Image: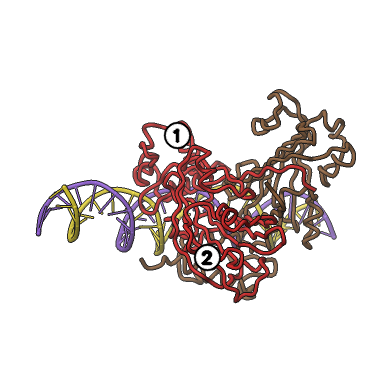
Chain colours: A brown, B red, C purple, D yellow
DNA sequence: CCAATATTCTGGTCTACACCAGGGATGGTG
DNA sequence: CACCATCCCTGGTGTAGACCAGAATATTGG
């Protein structure tokens, strides 16, 4: 079967993007409007959008709600097994981090946190944050901390590393951690907080963390834009 | 803004799927044809396809080339840090594994394997396999093994665990491993070998593995269907 | 000069239709 | 009974148009 036209289109656009085509993309990485591109390639908006969606799936470009298409920045390298703070590893990669606290409350144990082994009615500290890399919102996260392990936690500030806080202020030793990663389509709430459309491709990273005596410390759930990160894990000497 | 109709449609379809709607999906998990569904919901095929694409992104359903839409089976739990064989952990989850060897050759070091620290012209054993879960092709993988570490490897059979083979026959101890995971759109070759369309959402898992004396052993690259797996990593007592 | 308002531009959604190629079943043939 | 050619149904791709709501910008009024 002859190759579909939109696949050729995809390839052409990808080429242009690779070489930072000056005539194509403006200085902030914005692509020309869909109507303009469609006309330039002598095709329909529908077909053009297939090509754009293709590149979006590859993580090359992303859309900003009714503003246009933008070239996606380099993926952030991220090791979810380390407890290095977000600010640290973003900075280490020459990028600029920022964290926004969206909410700090006390809630009951969510169903997803059942791995902590607590009663469903057990109260937990609940912190919700949004994180940026170079002023692009790349993830929202919810953390549920066992209050007995860190009394008075909610009075703290949460724009820095939570794990660092737990270690320094409460001398908590993070020992066993169970990490789960699964591709997802972003749900309404998470999507709108990230300023993208519901259903945008994302990656869900969840952790359940215990201390050295196997007591539960916290459960957290991160929702990333799929094109924002590249996971890297370094391991030595297992099993 | 009023919710788009295709989002309502998505929700309705999702509900039907959740309860295994007997009237909807036949015994092999096949959905009615697009034209039929579109008519049933009194809308266009284009709009309906938006809803189906939505569910595809969530990993609820998947398409089989010109055959139709099918309910996606449960995700496979997979720990890429362990060296348990594919057959073992698939079986342990009550599923049926199968491995097909697609090719066994000697090749030069691919660019992606540069982490091995070998010269680009260094020859490597190259093994390419396709793996199934319950007769659904879920991944293709390429392995590049350093021949000095396992002379005569290509005479072996590769429908079982390669790591088990290396351990038993050559007494290789896998020590340091560097793992990378990144969402991707499946490229032409991988996609066609998996029987899906080019650009289908996938997950790329790559490993670079060294022995206890930091000598490179192998580099491998897995391309999974994004809806086929859920990654789970268990860790204790790290830094 | 600043703030409120109107306008323009962008992607988001949708209709209605058309043709194609591959997968699968059907039915005929040796 | 086994095999092969045929046909139908399916999703894949494409055209040509339309309207809407939000974002960005220009304009206007104080």
Q: Nearer the viewer, residue A141 or B133?
A: B133
The chain letter for the residue carrying disc 1 is: B
From the viewer's side, name the closer residue of B153 and A65. B153
CA–CA distance in space, label 2 to label 1? 54 Å
Q: Answer above or below: position of A211 versus C27.
A: above
- Residue B104 percent across, percent down from the top left: 47, 65
- Identify the element where label 1 is drawn: helix
* Direction right: furthest residue: A169
Asked if B165 appears above or below B74 in the picture, the reply is below
Q: Residue at x 53, y 68 (%)?
A: A37
Can residue A46 be seen at all in this image of the molecule?
no
- Relative image position of residue B165 (x, y in whole percent): 55, 55
Going 38% across and 35% down the picture, which residue do you hit? Answer: B24
**Mark nearer the viewer, 2 or 1:** 2
User: Which residue does the numbered mark 1 point to in the structure image?
Assistant: B16
Q: Residues within 10 Å of mark 1 (few under 14, many from 20)?
A: some
Q: Quadrant of residue A92?
A: bottom right
Return the residue at label 2. B152
Is the same chain shared between marks 2 and 1? yes
- The reply to whether residue A234 is in sight is yes
Which residue is drawn at the image coordinates 35% and 46% (left, top)? B35
């Amino acid at each position: 079967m002859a190759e579909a036209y939109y696949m050729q289109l995809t390839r052409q656009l990808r080429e242009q993007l690779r070489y930072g085509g000056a005539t194509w993309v403006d200085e902030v990485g914005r692509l020309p409007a869909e109507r303009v591109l469609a006309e330039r390639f002598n095709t329909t908006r529908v077909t053009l959008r297939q090509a754009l969606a293709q590149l979006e799936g590859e993580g090359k470009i992303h859309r900003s709600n009714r503003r246009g298409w933008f070239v996606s920045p380099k993926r952030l390298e991220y090791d979810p097994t380390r407890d290095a703070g977000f600010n640290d590893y973003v900075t280490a990669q020459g990028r600029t981090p920022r964290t926004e606290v969206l909410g700090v409350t006390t809630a009951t144990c969510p169903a997803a946190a059942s791995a902590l082994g607590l009663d469903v009615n057990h109260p937990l500290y609940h912190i919700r944050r949004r994180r940026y890399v170079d002023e692009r919102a790349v993830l929202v996260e919810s953390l549920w901390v066992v209050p007995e392990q860190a009394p008075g936690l909610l009075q703290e500030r949460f724009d820095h590393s939570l794990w660092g806080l737990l270690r320094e202020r409460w001398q908590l030793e993070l020992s066993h951690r169970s990490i789960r990663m699964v591709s997802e389509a972003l749900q309404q709430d998470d999507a709108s907080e990230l300023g993208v459309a519901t259903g945008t491709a994302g990656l869900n990273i969840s952790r359940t963390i215990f201390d050295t005596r196997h007591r539960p410390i916290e459960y957290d759930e991160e929702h990333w834009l799929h094109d924002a990160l590249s996971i890297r894990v370094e391991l030595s000497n297992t099993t």
